[in-house]
Amino acid sequence: MTPKPSPTPSVPPVDTPRIGYFTQPPRLTYANTTYDNVRESAVTYYFTIKLIKLPDEAGTPLQKITINQHEGLEYIRFNLKKSFVFEGTRSKKGKKLKLKDITSDKKTKTVSLIFDPPVLPGKTITVDLQARQNPVSEGIYLFGVKAFPVGEKSRGQFLGFGRLHFYSSD
């Protein structure tokens, strides 16, 4: 007598929505400032991000960016009313992008920018953060940049550190 094979349990298909994750994460390609002297006022910090577009897929749009100050002796404050995001790079500025919200959390040292509408893959964008003043203390300041795809429970992708070095002229 040959044993009967046991029935294979049926597994319902899992619907894994792509919303909430990047197919190909964006890249932080540039971070710089207009002036690197300490105590300089009304300066701009630039963070350029390239959204990758795969040849055979549309990819996932970008909904939000956070920029978090990780290192530096002082907390750098920004003038959010004058800050914005544009298509292109510092040297090749394109059109301004609409933001649903831009906020700063002093406790976590994080600036958050939410796009409306989300930014489509294949674009290069630059965050133009207007600092009220460069720090008084010279040194290296690191800013961690994170990108969040469209979705209510999206997972942020760490893109890297923007490194700004401030010098004293004394």
Image (spheres, helix red, strand yellow):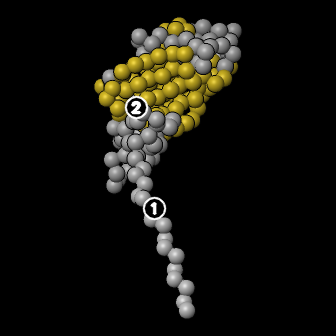
Q: CA distance from mark 1 to mark 2?
A: 34 Å
- The residue pinned by badge 1 equals 11
Q: Are marks 1 and 2 in contact (CB under 8 Å)?
A: no
Q: Residue at x 45, y 65 (%)?
A: 10
Q: Residues within 10 Å of mark 2 (few under 14, many from 20)?
A: many
Q: Nearer the viewer, residue 107 or 36?
A: 107
Q: Is residue 37 left or right of residue 46?
A: right
Q: Is residue 38 left or right of residue 32?
A: right
Q: Residue at x 55, y 11 (%)?
A: 77
Q: Residue at x 60, y 19 (%)?
A: 108
To which quarter of the image does residue 40 belong? top right
- The residue pinned by badge 2 equals 63
Q: Is residue 27 above or below residue 114?
A: below
SS of the residue under disc 2: strand
SS of the residue under disc 1: loop
Instruction: Tell me the mark number nearer the camera, choosing from 1 and 2.
Output: 1
| Amino acid type of the residue that numbered disc 2 sits on in the rendered structure | Gln
What's the mark number on residue 53?
none
Q: Residue at x 49, y 71 (%)?
A: 8
Q: Is residue 44 visible?
A: no
